[in-house]
Image (cartoon, helix red, strand yellow):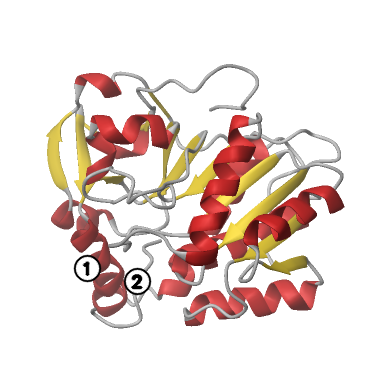
Amino acid sequence: MSDRPPDPAAHHAGDHEPDPRGHLGAAALDAQRLLVFSADALRRMDQLALERYGIPSLLLMENAARALADAALARLPEQNASAIVLCGPGNNGGDGLAAARHLSNAGVAVTIVVSQAEPRSQEARLHLDVARRMGLAICDGSQNGPKCATDAVDSLGGADLIVDALLGTGLTRAPEGAIRDLIHWTNSASEAGMPVIAADIPSGMAADTGEALQCAVRASTTVTFAGIKLGFLSLAAQPILGDVVVADIGIPRELLVSLGQRLDRPAHFDCFQADPAPAAQGRRPGRN
């Protein structure tokens, strides 16, 4: 989901190193071509999904969260799995909050770390309220995000995976404060061998250029929603993205085609994989 501002203003770390070329999901391929989306097109997509088709942002967020949770489950151990979910204040954070619910329902020990006590997104606030009512462990990282995240890992007796849902495609400036600190913490954990799955786009990456805005999460896997972001095609993005899979979140195909750019598949994306692999039997998130 795009991290809209309030106003207009298949890899497991330790198994092998991420392929720097990335892996594009088959859902994004159409007769050997890619549908690629700019940040502006993504903003319009959310707006038109509601205005033209009556599809609310909350439904798209739920679909994105299910895809994110499935991708995480496919990379987690079958038994005694644990995960840290880092959530920002916008809709990208809402994706993470909803995914944490699905992971918990699937038997994963989850701790949520929020970058601020209350999200600015209405949809994210709803999912945070649900998480609280479920009794999920939630740590407020607004004052000292790295300590909060480290304490969360310790409380779980170690974590198998980090979900990065701090910032989305609406980012236009360098991350600051708690989010910047959590990005640095995530990269340190990644360097120590902990896998990182990014929701939609690695936090801190510019959606249109693929460049880090001073700092960005270096993901093991990026589960990107609806389609490839324009910046993913840049060479600058490859060390940040890790493996890339595309998740269908229910955007009507005709809307995707009308907003996406078609272009031949670049050489450095010769390898691609299908949508996130289904979780192991009995571990797939159920309906709530």
Q: Is residue 30 left or right of residue 188?
A: left
Q: Is residue 194 left or right of residue 208?
A: right
Label drawn at residue 44:
1
Q: Residue at x 69, y 61 (%)?
A: 112
Mark 2 Cα within 10 Å, few/some/many (few <14, many 20+)?
many
Q: Element type at marker 1? A: helix
The kind of residue on which mark 1 rests is Arg
Q: Dividing the picture into quarters, in which one does residue 80 lie?
A: top right
Closer to the camera in the image, 264 or 132: 132
Picture coordinates of residue 117, whole percent (x, y): 62, 78
Mark 1 Cα within 10 Å, few/some/many (few <14, many 20+)?
some
Q: Residue at x 34, y 75 (%)?
A: 5
- Work out whether mark 2 precedes mark 1 in sequence or the reverse, and give the earlier one: 2
Residue 218 sits above or below residue 40 on the image: above
Closer to the camera in the image, 79 or 204: 204
From the image, which quarter does the N terminus lie in? bottom left
Residue 201 sits above or below residue 17 on the image: below
From the image, which quarter does the C terminus lie in? bottom right
Residue 156 sits above or below residue 271 on the image: below
The kind of residue on which mark 2 rests is Arg
Q: Residue at x 28, y 62 (%)?
A: 172
Q: Is residue 231 visible?
A: yes
Q: How many marks?
A: 2
Picture coordinates of residue 31, whole percent (x, y): 19, 29
Q: Is residue 101 visible?
A: no
Q: Residue at x 50, y 66 (%)?
A: 177
Picture coordinates of residue 228, whole percent (x, y): 29, 43
Q: Element type at marker 2? A: loop
Q: Which residue is mark 2?
A: 4
- Spatial CA distance of label 2 from label 1 is 11 Å
Picture coordinates of residue 17, whole percent (x, y): 53, 19
